[in-house]
Amino acid sequence: MVVMAIAVIPTIDFSGEDGGIVSRETTSSMESLWVDIENTDTVARRFSVRVAAPGSDAPVDGVRVLPDNAPELNGGENRRVLLVFQALRPGELREAEVCYAPEIRPQDATCTHFAIRRL
């Protein structure tokens, strides 16, 4: 089982699960979100992370996951990764769907849709 929790860094506006979308507005050209993943299995698992345009497999320019996109977690371990939306232009709305899953069970993916708007 995969559990994903979201911790946000305060900005001007944040709205939670509005129609399944985590959205916020910012005046900055770069916006960061902490994403926690948890390995609820009892054995170590390597997780894959996918960042794509919502509803597709197309990559999203200007969205990075740090430190990497394939963390290995021991059984019961939590890991925090940073999702960074870079080079946002004034008025731009950038959306990305972030999914985590054990590499051996990609069908068990947990996904969250993010939408960041620069004012």
Image: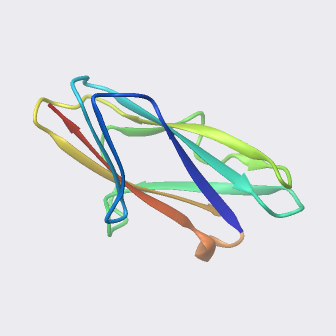
Q: Residue at x 70, y 42 (%)?
A: 79
Give the side of residue 10 with respect to residue 25, left or right: right
Q: Quadrant of the C terminus?
A: top left
**Which image quadrant is residue 27 in?**
top left
Q: Residue furthest left?
A: 91
In the orientation shown, which residue stands out farthest toward the right? 42
Q: Residue at x 59, y 76 (%)?
A: 107
Between 64 and 5, the residue placed more toward the observer is 5
Q: Position of residue 68 (x, y in %)?
A: 59, 39
Rendering colour mode: rainbow
Above/below status of 31 relative to 60? above
Q: Residue furthest bottom?
A: 107
- Residue under the image location 57 percent in, 68 percent down: 109
Where is residue 18 drawn, in percent x and y? 32, 59
From where the camera sits, is residue 18 visible? Answer: yes
Towards the viewer: 67 or 113: 113
In this picture, residue 83 sits left or right of residue 22: right
Residue 10, image x and y in percent? 40, 28
Determine whether, in the image, residue 22 is placed left or right of residue 39: left
Which of the 4 image quadrants contains residue 35? top right
Give the vertical position of 41 relative to 51 (above or below).
Answer: below
Quarter of the rendering occupied by the N terminus: bottom right
In the rendered image, is residue 103 in sight? no
Which image quarter: residue 117?
Answer: top left
How many dots with numbers? 0
**Looking at this rendering, what residue extends furthest in the top direction?**
28
